[in-house]
Image (tube, grey):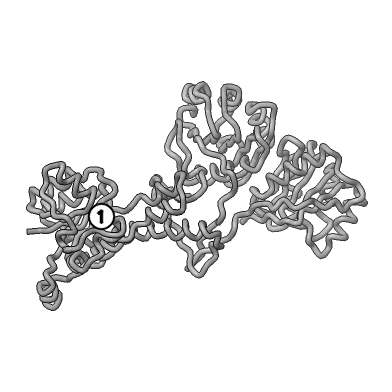
Amino acid sequence: MPRALLSVTDKTGLVEFAQALAKHGYEFVSTGGTAKALRDAGLKVQDVADVTGFPEMLDGRVKTLHPKIHGGLLGDTRLPAHTSAMKEAGIEPFHLVVVNLYAFEKTVTGPHTLEEAIESVDIGGPAMIRASAKNYANVAVVVDPEDYKLVLEAIEGDYLEQIRLRLAAKAFRHTAFYDSMVSRYFTQAVGDSPFKETITLGFRKQLMMRYGENMHQQAGLFIDPLGLPGIAQAEQKSGKELSYNNILDADRAWELVADMPTGACAIIKHGNPCGAAIGVDNGESYRLAKESDPISAFGGIAAFNSEVGKVAAEAMTEKGNFLEVVIAPSFTQEAIDMFKNRSGWGPDARLLLAQLPANKVSLTVRSVRGGALIQDSDEDPGNEWQLPTQRRPSEDELKALRLMWSIIPHVGSNAIVVGSANRLLGTGAGQMNRVQSVRLALEQAGELSKGAALASDAFFPFPDSIETAAAAGITAIVQPGGSKKDGEVIAAADRLGIAMALTGTRHFRH
């Protein structure tokens, strides 16, 4: 008679699954709350303590860690030596194991103490899952209620043996993900650097997409349960399903407005800002941001760091506009309805409700062939700026410099931005030489460059960029400094009447 071991935290569908198993002749061994749920449903259950001859102890910490349990999970009944040893020890084999783990994630993502986190670390569960998965030739292991139907169909069709390896692979993923959360939590709890000899990252699939960056690529969105809130956890209030490129650009837009003063709007297209502004309300913020580059803003991603209401929705849904995604910390129902009722693209616009992060993610991860590059996120340390030029920036120039400096980390290198105290006027992104980025930003800003501020993500290696900026009417520049020719660059600024600030922090983005 087949024998099943059941011990679950998530009891979704448990009783119905067990009732179906009972019809196929399965006997049940179980623990605690799982055993009670089965008995309450009228099923016959043998307690683990009756199998082991040893009661639960240490407040339930030791229940299943016993040879009569693990011998039944690990014994390879194809081997005469194993069956002989099991018989001699009075160990009966298990054929099906249904286990899921203590809700560690739920505990540590809500209000909790370290002691509560410790008590939520499952020991016996992962041991049973791994033992069963290792012995998949003899045991089917189930860790997800979503697989109950699959297993029942396999039992009824007499092909359970054919899916045991697939179930084992899922079981190992399940325990690896669980252990990744535990290891990360305790690493953070003791304040250790994540750059240890090994690093574990665990992600759970949120959704599959129709395709990736290009139509021939597969893609999915995976969330980090222990990560900071952001685009991955955003609630979609309206519109079509999100694409891979939508999410990339939405994340860039969300990062940018999180760094800008309250009341800001940013528009992103193909990974770079094509507009950013702060107005008296979000309607004006959007219009000013769009004016930076109206052509690129069409079909872009707009993000706001304050509530989107009627005024902003009216501005965005005006004739001639088209947005793929709009992100905000909140939307009024009136604003949502205005998008839904806008003829053409309005009902398809993806409206995302996302929580502004209190701080940036601690790590960024980039895949390389054969491995990964992992680094701290680019968070400006807020160093005091040096003002090395003879002319100091005016109050308005300083406001413009600070706004441009909040935007520059979000532009692909080599990066130059030109703007005023309330909006971006021109962007030079992704050029192989800095002076070309300067020319592009100035060309986009046009006549508005006169009296504007300019920011650079890295130092100027030569004075040529300063001379080009001055010729277009730029009056103030902010840059990290650190070039061997800083003296020549500063001298050029003095000669041309430009006020310059040095931040001491580079902001490359590749």
Percent from the top left, x then y, of residue 184?
Answer: 47, 58
Asked if residue 163 can be seen in this view, the reply is no
Q: Is residue 255 above or below residue 88?
A: above
Q: In this view, does 276 lie above or below 59?
A: above
Give the residue drawn at x 58%, y 36%: 302
Front in this rendered view, residue 420 or 125: 125
Judge from the rendering whether residue 91 lies leftward or rightward of residue 451; answer left or right.
Answer: left
Q: Count the labels in the image.
A: 1
Quarter of the picture containing the N terminus is: bottom left
Q: In this view, does 279 lie above or below 441?
A: above
Asked where in the image residue 310 lies, by quadrant, the reply is top right
Percent from the top left, x then y, of residue 132?
Answer: 23, 63
Judge from the rendering whether residue 98 lies leftward or rightward of residue 416; answer left or right.
Answer: left
- In the picture of the structure, the residue carrying the numbered disc 1 is 99
Give the residue drawn at x 25%, y 67%: 134
Q: In this view, does 235 lie above or below 461?
A: above
Front in this rendered view, residue 354 or 446: 354
Asked if residue 508 can be seen in this view, the reply is yes
Percent from the top left, x then y, of residue 482?
Answer: 78, 61
Counting other residues with Cα less than 10 Å from the Cα at mark 1, is it few (<14), some (14-19), or many (20 or more)?
A: many
Q: What element carries label 1?
A: strand
Give the residue drawn at x 80%, y 36%: 447
Give the residue drawn at x 73%, y 35%: 422
Percent from the top left, x then y, of residue 138?
Answer: 17, 65
Quarter of the picture containing the C terminus is: bottom right
The amino acid at mark 1 is Val
Judge from the rendering whether residue 76 lies leftward or rightward of residue 356; answer left or right.
Answer: left
Most extreme residue toward the bottom is: 81
